[in-house]
Amino acid sequence: MCEPASDHVKPMTLSKIVTREEWLAARRAFLAREKAFTRQRYAHAEALRKLPMVKVEKEYVFDAPQGTVTLRDLFEGRRQLIVYHLMFDPDRSRACKHCACVMDNIAGSLVHLTARNTSFAAVSRAPLARIEPFKRRMQWTFPWVSSFKNDFNYDYHTTLDPDRGYSTYNYERTRIRGEMPGLSVFYREKDLILHSYSTYFVGLDIFLPMYHLLDVTRLGRQENDGNSMTAGERSWIRYHDEYGGDGGAKSGCCAT
C-alpha cells in the first residue's frame, strides 16, 4: 500500500458539494474540454509521426545475458524498436528508483507491442553484472542490455560528460553530468536503421499510467510541482518492493 504524500505537499481545497443534477451539468460542460484535448492529442501524435528520421551510422554492440547483441538484434526481426534509457550508474548497485517506477508502469503493456511489429528494450550504462541482480529483484522480464562498452548513451544524450563534449540534454545545453532518463525510437527498413524520435525527463510523463489514473482523482498527483521526478530526495517514489516499510524512505535517485 502506498504511503501518504510527503509533508511538503500543500493541502488542497476541496470544491463544493452539489446535487446530482448540478454535478451532471458541470460534468457535461467539462466533456467538451475533454473532447477538444483528445482531438489535440491525436493531432500531436500524427504530427510526431511525420517528423524526419536520421540514419544510424554506428554499429552499437551491447552486452546481453546471451552474449553480445547489436542494435539491429534488439529489433528481434520487427520493424520498430523502442528503447528506454534506464538510469543506472556503472558505480552503483541499483538503478534509479524513478526509472524503476517508469518500467513498472510500462512492463505490463509490452506484450501488446509485438502485435504491432514493435520491440522494446532497456539500455543502461551499468555493466551487465550489476543489471542482472537488480532485474531479478524487480522481477522484470523485458530485454535489458548494457551499453558500458559503447557510446550509445552518450550519442543519445542520456549520459552527460561536458569534458567529452556531451553536454546537451532535452535539446538544450546543460551543466548536468552523469546518467539521465530518456526514451528513443528506431525504425528498420531492410538493412537501414533510422532514429525517429527521442524524448527526455518530463516528456516521459505520458508513458506513466499511474499518473494519469491519479489525475482523475480528487487528490491528483499530490505533488507540489506536478512531477515527483523533480523532487529529488523528497520524492515519494520507491522501488516497488519497498512500499509499506522504511526501506528506501530516504534513498536518493540512484542510491547504492
Image: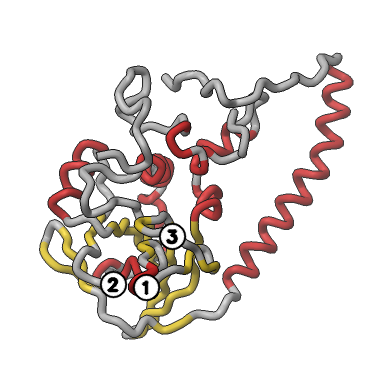
Return the x and y of residue 30 as percentages of the image width and height: 81, 37
**For residue 22, what is the image quadrant?**
top right
Who's the residue at 46% across and 39% down the image?
232
Q: Is residue 19 above or below residue 189?
A: above
Q: Provide the secondary structure element on which disc 1 rests.
A: helix
- Residue under label 1: 155
Q: Could you tell me if the residues under marks 1 and 2 are in contact, i.e. CB atoms within 8 Å?
A: yes
Q: Provide the secondary structure element on which disc 3 rests.
A: strand
Who's the residue at 88% across and 28% down the image?
25
Q: Earlier in the sequence, mark 3 or mark 2?
A: 2
Who's the residue at 26% across and 80% down the image?
59
Q: Nearer the viewer, residue 69 or 222?
A: 222
Q: Mark 2 Cα within 10 Å, few/some/many (few <14, many 20+)?
A: some
Type of residue at label 3? Leu
Q: Nearer the viewer, residue 150 or 251?
A: 251
Who's the residue at 17% across and 49% down the image?
130
Distance Cα–Cα, label 1 vs label 3: 13 Å
The answer to whether residue 188 is visible is yes
- Residue under label 3: 183
- Residue under label 2: 151
Type of residue at label 2? Asp
Type of residue at label 1? Asp
Distance Cα–Cα, label 3 vs label 2: 16 Å
